[in-house]
Image: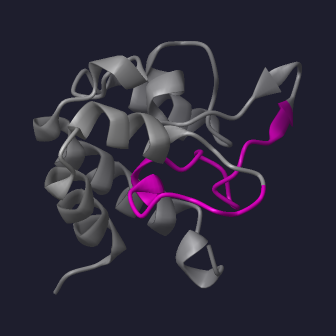
Amino acid sequence: MSDKYDKAQAWLLAQPNFHDAIAVAWHYNEEGEQSPGHCLFQYVSLSGTPVDVGDHALCGCLTQIAGGNHVATTEALTTAIRLDKRIPTGVRNIKQEDLPVFAEWQRRIDKELERCKMSL
């Protein structure tokens, strides 16, 4: 059964300029107007938005955490994300074949943080 992450991947792959579509989808927009592909790049927080997690640490998205610049809302997720070498360390490094990795992680994050109980 298709979920929002499958739909986001399909939308991104259908765009004529994949890298431009990724850049727009990756960007967090506080006004709530997001690209149809944005859910793949949500921040690793309960709300899916950037949050301060204390000790001068900011919650980031998968690429930011993998790159070592930000953290997830749990130490366990931060460690697991940094150990997964399939995650690109920057938005410019994201390729079409990376999208299933982002979907896999977002599903895992939904489950571990119980985000599925929230309306994102």
The prevailing secondary structure element of the residues shown in magenta is loop
| Percent coordinates x, y for residue 31 in the rendering | 77, 58
Taking the image as shown, residue 24 lies to the left or right of residue 94, namely right
Residue at coordinates 64% horizontally, 81% vertically from top-left?
119
Taking the image as shown, residue 79 lies to the left or right of residue 46, namely left
**Residue at the extreme bottom of the image, as rendered:** 1
Q: Quadrant of residue 101?
A: top left
Q: Is residue 35 above or below residue 25?
A: below
Query: Which quarter of the figure is the N terminus placed in?
Result: bottom left
Judging depth in this view, the residue of 44 and 114 nearest the camera is 44
| Percent coordinates x, y for residue 99 in the rendering | 22, 45
In magenta stretch: residue 52: yes
Q: Which residues are magenta?
A: 31-53
Taking the image as shown, residue 15 lies to the left or right of residue 48, namely left
Q: Quadrant of residue 53?
A: top right
**Residue at the extreme left of the image, as rendered:** 97
| Percent coordinates x, y for residue 111 in the rendering | 46, 68
Residue at coordinates 21% horizontally, 51% vertically from top-left?
15
| Percent coordinates x, y for residue 62 in the rendering | 46, 35
Q: Quadrant of residue 61?
A: top right
Judging depth in this view, the residue of 34 and 2 nearest the camera is 34
Residue at coordinates 29% horizontally, 78% vertically from top-left?
3
Residue at coordinates 39% horizontally, 17% vertically from top-left?
89
Q: Is residue 46 above or below residue 100?
A: below
Q: Is residue 1 above or below residue 108?
A: below
In magenta stretch: residue 50: yes
